Structures are given as structure tokens and as C-alpha cells.
Image (cartoon, helix red, strand yellow):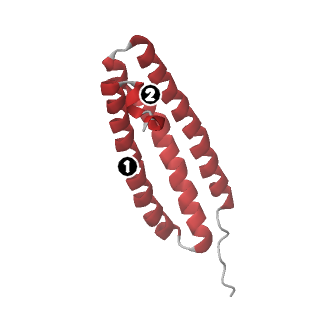
Amino acid sequence: MYYYLPEPPYFLIFVGLFAGITSGLAFEASLKQIVQEWSKTGMSETLKQAQGVKLQLPFLAMSVGICVFLASGLEVFLFDRWLTYAIALPVTIFIAALVWIQLGKLLKQLQQGGSKAIDLDAF
């Protein structure tokens, strides 16, 4: 009897990375479009709607892609798939929540003070 070690999921590393990058680009484009609409109209409802499905879907897809990438990368070094996803899922959820909260604060700051409120070169 031979002991068989499963192959690390190199394919999933590339799939997760590809999904994360492409969803990140879609998220960036959606965010830019929402901010441009807000700057043209000046309506506060535009930024309130910014955290709707138009941004949530690419953000969720980006988070899932990053989770798969992280778990597959960990599986190269740890052989148990359940353990890698048990590590990658909470880390991804925590970081995604922090980014989403920070984005909400940034959009609120943009709404209250305009684009000069987030100008980092002004200080």
C-alpha cells in the first residue's frame, strides 16, 4: 500500500487570483461611476445608494476570489482542505468587513465635506 498525497490546488490558486482581480476591477469601475454621478448631480441619495447591489456584488465576488486564493495557497503548505478554509474564511470575512466599513466612512466623509475632505495632499 502506498500513501497518496493529493496534489495542491494550483489551478484554484490561479482561479481565485483571477476572480479577485477581475472582480476588483469591476468594483473599482462601479465605485468610480457612482462617485462621478454624485459629483455631477450633487445628490446625497447617490452616495447612499452606493452601498447597494451595484457595489456589493463585485465586492462579494472579489472577497470570494480572495478567500479561494488564500485557502488554496495555504493548502500548498497544509494538506488539509478543511483547515485551510477554516483559516482563510474568517480572515477574509474580517478584512472584507473592515474594508467595507472604511469605504462607508469615506463615502460619508465625501458626502459631508466634498472632495476636499478626503484630499490627502492638503495636510
Which label number is shown at residue 26? none
| Residue of label 2 | 54
Q: Looking at the image, which residue is at 43% across and 59% down? A: 91
List x then y, in percent, for residue 51: 37, 31
Q: Looking at the image, which residue is at 53% across and 51% down? A: 66
Depth check, mark 1 against mark 2: the one in front is 1
Instruction: Say whether residue 19 is left or right of residue 113.
Output: right
Q: Quadrant of residue 115?
A: top left
In this orientation, does residue 35 appear? yes
Instruction: Say whether residue 85 is left or right of residue 75.
Output: left
Label 2 CA crowd tier, 10 Å (few <14, some 14–19, many 20+): some
**Which of the pair 96/116 is nearer the observer?**
116
Quadrant occupied by the N terminus: bottom right
| Residue of label 1 | 98
Amino acid type of disc 2?
A: Lys
List x then y, in percent, for residue 24: 55, 39
Above-or-below relation of 100 to 39: below
